[in-house]
Image (cartoon, rainbow, N blue to C red):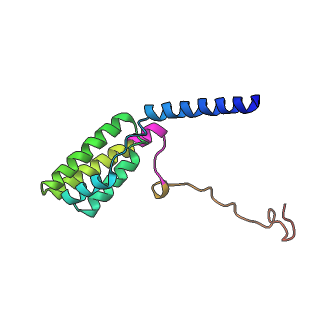
Amino acid sequence: MRQGLLLVAAVSMISAHSNSFAQVQEAGKLTDTEAAFQRLVEQCDNVDMLMLRARIRLELPRTTEEAAGVASEKLLKGFELCASGNMAEGKVVLEEGYEIAKIGVTEKFGQEGTGGDETTVSEPKPVETASNKKPWWKFW
């Protein structure tokens, strides 16, 4: 009986702590992302610009605070330009914002290049001669 009471008390303390943590993180505030996205599409339906928006938004949590602020401003400015009919200028601004966000990620994590951007140098293979060649049955 006493163990059950202690278990209930512990569980209630943990749940109270997790609720307060969620309130600090503003977990209860929901935004209608579909409506916000639909408004952007109505203003500017250029697929390249929407893809750049998605790329910038993916980089924002990983980049530095300064780069995130500048990239967010460029994101808004790019879509304002697109909504006013200047798609080419808007796309250039979004590309700048994406590059700034990528540079911020590089600064934060200290790496350059991802995937195909990296160049790797491989060691040359040693030339096999009769003196260093092993018989086929020796694996070690």
Taking the image as shown, residue 119 lies to the left or right of residue 69, namely: right
Q: How many marks?
A: 0
Q: Check residue 105 for magenta coloring.
A: yes
Quarter location, residue 17: top right
- Screen quadrant of the N terminus: top right
Eyeballing the image, is 39 above or below 67? below
The location of residue 104, given as percent across then percent down, is 39, 40
Eyeballing the image, is 33 above or below 67? below
Taking the image as shown, residue 49 lies to the left or right of residue 30, namely: left
Q: Residue at 34% of width from left, 34% of height from top?
A: 66
Q: Residue at 87% of width from left, 70% of height from top?
A: 137
Q: Nearer the viewer, residue 137 or 16?
A: 16
Which residue is most to the left? 84
Which residue is most to the front? 1
The location of residue 135, given as percent across then percent down, is 85, 69
Q: Nearer the viewer, residue 109 or 126?
A: 109
- Screen quadrant of the C terminus: bottom right
Quarter location, residue 127: bottom right
Eyeballing the image, is 103 above or below 54? above
Q: Nearer the viewer, residue 137 or 101?
A: 101
Q: Check residue 95 for magenta coloring.
A: no
Q: Which residues are magenta?
A: 104-114
Q: Residue at 60% of width from left, 29% of height from top?
A: 13
Q: Nearer the viewer, residue 17 or 37?
A: 17
Taking the image as shown, residue 64 lies to the left or right of residue 37, namely: right
Which residue is most to the bottom? 136
